[in-house]
Structure formats: structure tokens, C-alpha cells
């Protein structure tokens, strides 16, 4: 599923509860802080917020004994307002003259060149310069090559933090020059409690849909997406009655601004449903849709393992191309026809 544009500001946000212990343990080693840190983990864990928390701590002029930011010095005040001159946030976003933010496919070399120029400047607050790149795998090849030069010879008192949802997609030359900080998934009870505090109904179920990632669960909790999920899963459970054309028409009937998120959601539900079906087929339990255990168990004997895995791979490939789908309806119909054919082949075989 495609990610909604995060706020372009780098203003202070509360540290997410499942990050507190990791942040405390990491900041205790502040005196040995690496000049390049790779904050890695699956999407939806809040890694961007964690990296910005570290950035504010590094810029703080009167850090606490545990290494965290004091919250009251001039640097902390600037950071809280999203206006610290020694902090840069590089994301695949474009902001037009009216302040509208648009998600784009890549972080281009021009953005990294701007970052390089920033690292060469003197600090305004005479503390440090910090840059956060999120997600780092969005850099195109030219941008990654440009960043490599800075990683090889980082200026003094300059800290780079690369946030990555899929660190395996980073060039080895980039990843090898960073100290890696894995961000684990939170405890289920803590994540559910946080989601409930955000007003999410049926937080346990939505968290399962997100594979344990709370921020992704918060996105998936949108009522429009949940209605689409319930409708689509009911049809996937009965492939012989599945109508790709009808589902495509429903997508086409949505408003222009809703089509892209609905298509991304449909591909996400297909991915999670297929992953659960593969798990049940292999003798395991469904991870994303445990409430559909019986339906998945009924489907599993009807599908061959190799075609199912190939279909899952095709879903992953299509998901990577969803930034600018020219015909959302045709994309959805093609994927659903391919899903239905999995069971048609099993009957003919």
C-alpha cells in the first residue's frame, strides 16, 4: 500500500511509546555516535519520527544526562517549531508554491547535492549539522552515488541518518558505510493501546492487517479502506464468484482523489490475503487476517503452491509500479483475473 505524504515539517513530535527503551539505550552511547546511522525496519513502525528524535538530541545545546534533548534550549525551541537551520529532512516529496505536498517516485540527485552543500556550511548554532533521508531507498542511482561521496568523507560534526523500510534495496556501498540500528516491531499490547488512544476501533484486527506495524494500522483504519477490505476479502474467499470487472467498476466509480489509495489498498489486501493463503497451505496460521482462518483453510487445498508463490511475486512487482498507474481499473482487473485463474487451473488439473 502506498504511503500517505508525511508532514513536511520536522517539528517535534512525541516519542512513540514502543521506541522509548530503544531511544534511551541508543542515546546513552551519544559520545560514540556514528556519522552515518541506518535506521532500518519494516514500514509503519515510526522510524522517521525516531530518527528526528535522535536529530533533535544531537542538536540540543544542553543535553540531559541520558543524552536526550533538554527541550528548552534555543536549538530545541527551533527544532520544536520545525525551523532549525542545522537540520535537513530529505524525502521524496514536492511542495508547490501554494504549499501542496505531492509524493514522487524518487529522491533525485539535485536533492542530495543540496544536502552536500548543506554539510559544507558552518553550523548556525555551533553544535552540529544533521540530515535525515527517509526513505533512503527512494534515492535514484545518481543520488546514491552523490551521497556516497559525503559518506566517504563526512565533514566534522555532521551526522547523517538514513531511514529505510527495505534496506536490502540500498546499494551495498551505502549500507556498508552506515552503522545499522534495527527497529523491532512493538509489543502487541502496547501497539493496540496506542491505536485505541488514536480512536481506532477494533484495534487488534487492524493491527493484524498491518502485520504488527502501528502507523500502517492507523492508515488502514480509514473507514473507506476498511469497507473496501471487507468487500474484497469476501469476494476473494469465493473465487468462483469473483467478478474482476465489477470490482474494477467500483474502483472506477470512486472519486479521482480516492482511486489511487483504493488501488494501493486493493493490492495490499491481495498481498496479505495471498501471504495468509500460502501460510495456511504450508501448515501455518494466517498472520494478517486471522478472522478468515476457516475461509483460507477451505481455499488452500484448491490452489497449487508454485503458481500461488508466482502470483505473490507478481503482486510485489506490481506494487512497486503503483506510484502513477495510468489505468487503475485495468490494473485491478488484471490482478483479480490472475487470482481467479489460480483456482480455475486447479479445477482443470
Image (cartoon, helix red, strand yellow):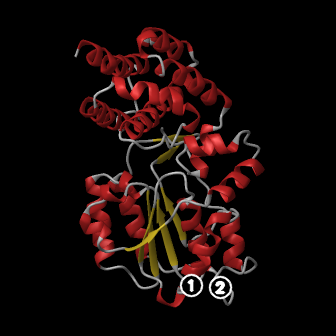
Q: Is residue 28 above or below residue 104?
A: below
Secondary structure beneath label 2:
loop
Based on the displayed image, in which of its 4 quarters is residue 325 positioned? top left
Viewer-proximal residue among 101 and 288: 288
- Closer to the chain start, of discs 2 and 1, is 2
Viewer-proximal residue among 167 and 154: 167
Viewer-proximal residue among 344 and 172: 344
Give the residue drawn at x 42%, y 37%. 280
Question: How many C-alpha atoms fall within 10 Å of the one at disc 2: few (<14), some, or many (≥20)?
Answer: many
Give the residue drawn at x 58%, y 70%. 85
Based on the displayed image, in which of its 4 quarters is residue 291 positioned? top right
Give the residue drawn at x 29%, y 37%. 313
Give the residue drawn at x 35%, y 23%. 302
Label 1: which residue?
127
Q: Is residue 201 above or below residue 83?
A: above
The CA distance from mark 2 to mark 1 is 7 Å
Quarter of the picture containing the C terminus is top left
Label 2: which residue?
61
Residues under numbered marks 2 and 1 in contact, where contact means CB atoms less than 8 Å apart: yes
- Residue 168: percent from left, percent from top: 31, 58
- Residue 92: percent from left, percent from top: 45, 49
Secondary structure beneath label 1:
loop
Look at the image and tell me whether residue 98 can be seen: no
Look at the image and tell me whether residue 347 can be seen: yes
Residue 266's disc is: none
Q: Is residue 25 above or below residue 134?
A: below
- Residue 203: percent from left, percent from top: 69, 44
- Residue 212: percent from left, percent from top: 56, 51
Q: In this view, does 254 lie to the left or right of 277?
A: right
Q: In this view, does 293 lie to the left or right of 10?
A: left
Q: Is residue 328 left or right of residue 256?
A: left
Viewer-proximal residue among 244 and 318: 244
Amino acid at each position: 500500500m502506498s504511503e500517505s505524504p508525511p508532514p513536511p515539517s520536522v517539528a517535534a513530535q512525541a516519542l512513540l511509546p514502543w521506541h522509548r527503551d530503544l531511544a534511551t539505550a541508543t542515546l546513552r552511547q551519544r559520545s560514540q555516535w556514528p556519522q552515518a546511522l541506518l535506521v532500518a525496519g519494516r514500514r509503519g513502525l515510526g522510524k522517521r519520527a525516531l530518527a528526528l528524535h535522535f536529530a533533535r538530541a544531537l542538536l540540543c545545546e544542553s543535553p540531559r544526562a541520558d543524552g536526550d534533548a533538554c527541550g528548552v534550549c534555543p536549538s530545541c525551541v527551533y527544532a520544536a517549531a520545525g525551523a532549525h537551520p542545522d537540520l535537513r529532512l530529505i524525502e521524496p516529496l514536492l511542495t508547490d508554491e501554494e504549499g501542496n505536498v505531492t509524493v514522487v517516485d524518487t529522491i533525485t540527485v539535485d536533492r542530495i547535492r543540496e544536502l552536500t552543500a548543506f554539510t559544507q556550511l558552518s553550523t548556525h548554532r555551533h553544535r552540529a549539522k544533521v540530515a535525515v533521508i527517509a526513505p533512503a531507498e527512494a534515492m535514484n542511482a545518481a543520488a546514491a552515488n552523490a551521497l556516497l561521496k559525503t559518506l566517504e568523507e563526512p565533514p566534522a560534526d555532521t551526522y547523517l541518518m538514513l531511514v529505510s523500510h527495505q534496506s536490502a534495496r540500498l546499494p551495498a556501498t551505502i549500507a556498508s558505510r552506515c552503522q545499522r540500528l534495527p527497529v523491532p516491531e512493538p509489543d502487541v499490547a502496547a501497539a493496540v493501546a496506542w491505536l485505541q488512544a488514536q480512536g481506532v476501533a477494533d484495534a487488534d484486527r487492524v493491527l493484524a492487517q498491518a502485520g504488527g506495524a502501528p502507523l500502517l494500522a492507523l492508515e488502514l483504519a480509514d473507514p473507506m479502506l476498511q469497507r473496501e477490505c471487507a468487500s474484497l476479502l469476501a469476494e476473494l474467499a469465493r473465487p468462483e464468484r469473483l467478478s474482476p470487472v465489477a470490482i474494477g467498476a467500483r474502483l472506477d466509480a470512486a472519486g479521482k482523489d480516492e482511486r489511487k489509495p483504493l488501488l494501493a489498498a486493493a493490492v495490499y489486501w491481495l498481498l496479505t490475503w495471498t501471504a495468509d493463503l500460502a501460510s495456511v497451505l504450508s501448515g501455518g496460521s494466517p498472520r494478517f487476517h486471522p478472522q478468515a482462518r476457516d475461509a483460507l483453510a477451505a481455499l488452500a487445498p484448491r490452489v497449487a503452491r508454485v503458481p500461488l508463490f508466482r502470483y505473490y511475486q507478481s503482486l510485489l512487482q506490481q506494487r512497486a509500479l503503483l506510484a502513477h498507474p495510468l489505468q487503475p481499473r485495468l490494473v485491478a482487473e488484471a490482478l483479480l483475473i490472475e487470482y481467479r485463474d489460480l483456482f480455475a487451473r486447479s479445477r482443470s488439473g
